[in-house]
Amino acid sequence: MKDNSEIVSLLGKHLQQIRKEKKLTLEQLAKKSGVSRSMLSQIERGQANPTFGTLWNLSRALGLDMSELVEEFESSGPISGKIDVLLAADTPRITNAQNGCTLSILGPHDQVEQFEWYELQIEPNGILDSQPHTQGTREHLTILQGAAEVTSGDQTIQLNEGDTGRYKADVPHAIRCVGESTLRAILVVMG
Amino acid sequence: MKDNSEIVSLLGKHLQQIRKEKKLTLEQLAKKSGVSRSMLSQIERGQANPTFGTLWNLSRALGLDMSELVEEFESSGPISGKIDVLLAADTPRITNAQNGCTLSILGPHDQVEQFEWYELQIEPNGILDSQPHTQGTREHLTILQGAAEVTSGDQTIQLNEGDTGRYKADVPHAIRCVGESTLRAILVVMG
DNA sequence: ACCGAAAATCCTTTATATTGGAATTTTTCG
DNA sequence: CGAAAAATTCCAATATAAAGGATTTTCGGT
């Protein structure tokens, strides 16, 4: 297993902080949660790595959500402190000349993401036709310039400059450029 | 310890669902997370009660927050099947005439999101000066038109049309419009 | 300082989380 | 359908989470 003693130790400190805030002794929390005082002591000092079930019992005893118990740690990990730049020339693009579409990938792609965002450009009468994404995915389309006709499932709607449309993307869907000017838009995909 | 086999079993189902959605095999997830495939198999079938450290490794590999992994499991609310439209005229905007800034809020705001996106407009020499957001937040700025000077912490960089900058937003940071033309850009905030 | 009494830590034992590889099941493809 | 490949589950061995009791530390009050 990867080394995660650091994060386990932080969890312990966090737990202790919560217990102290609620002015509970190890004994009291042990009684309430069903987790032994010795285990609590070890967890708080980073000497044990509690199971999910133990954390669940603790969260119930403390009147917290699991997510509240672990929320301090959501976004740690090695993140660059400097400004990362992606030059226009280096921006990954997907072009479909046939349909007059260009999709510029603006989001970072160095990890598994649940969000992606793109700048979309479609020539007059061009169309971006998409297969369903994974269950529950939604798309958010904001028109920067021109006008679009959006189809999701069996519904079709027109969006004009500045409008935003939100729709299911786990069914077949399409974006068409209507009018004579090139369509420019921001497309956000949330999985 | 109190009986919590029920909740542990639900966690397993939840994990399997996420893995399948991302089209990963046990082997692939094992490699990425450092958790053995047999352990993954047991967890998914509710036959094992993973430690906090194991969950942490899994959440990193899946690109999720801990809180998303351990979320209340019944919570998949119904999502609208129709296309929701936000007209340009109704788009919420934050304007700071003093500094020549307009921020159009493009993301949905019906729930607490860890992801927000905006269209940003700044007049020449205008500046958008921001206080630190919560720990771990990053911003992604793509220039649609004009040029910007971005400062994050003690670093400053110039971005031109089409460029994207990514930087820490949990420190004081600012975006300034440089050159004579109005700056237009897409700003994505990931918490 | 010296005393309890309460709280936290240490120690031993037991239960089980975790692993690597073998066996089985499921999928793919001719 | 049958064989090969891929994916998952089973199994034996090891590491460690968890419990319960013994020991040490903390901290009032006198």
Image (cartoon, coloured by chain):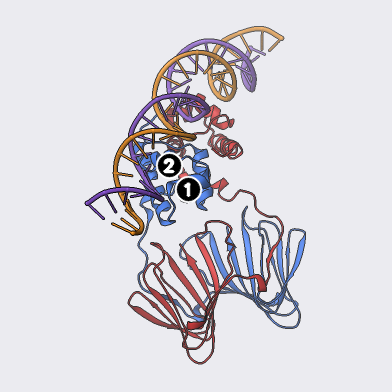
Chain colours: A red, B blue, C orange, D purple
Q: Is residue A30 above or below residue B46?
A: above
Residue A34 lies, with reference to residue A1, above or below; the image says above
Dot 1 surroundings within 10 Å: few (below 14), some, or many (20 or more)?
many
Give how far apart the Cα atoms at labels 1 and 2 are.
8 Å
x and y percentages locating residue B45 in the rendered image: 35, 41
Task: Please name the residue shown 59% across and 36% down the image.
Answer: A5
Q: Residue at x 73, y 80 (%)?
A: B124
- Residue type at mark 1 is Leu
* Front residue (pair B96, A191): A191
Residues marked 1 and 2 touching at CB (< 8 Å): yes
Identify the mark at residue B67; answer none if there is no mark.
none
Query: In the rendered structure, which amino acid carries the disc numbered 2?
Result: Leu
The label on residue B29 is 1
Q: Chain of mark 1?
A: B
Say which quadrant the N terminus of chain B sits in: top left
Residue A186, x across and y down, in percent:
54, 75
For the residue pair A77 and B72, the one nearer the viewer reads as A77
Q: Is residue B52 found left or right of B97 in the rendered image?
A: left
Question: Looking at the image, which residue is at 60% across and 48% down?
Answer: A76
Q: Identify the residue position indicated by label 2 in the image.
A: B40
Answer above or below: position of A55 versus B159: above
Looking at the rendered structure, the number of numbered marks drawn on it comes to 2
Where residue B154 sits in the image (x, y, percent)? 77, 59
Q: Chain of mark 2?
A: B
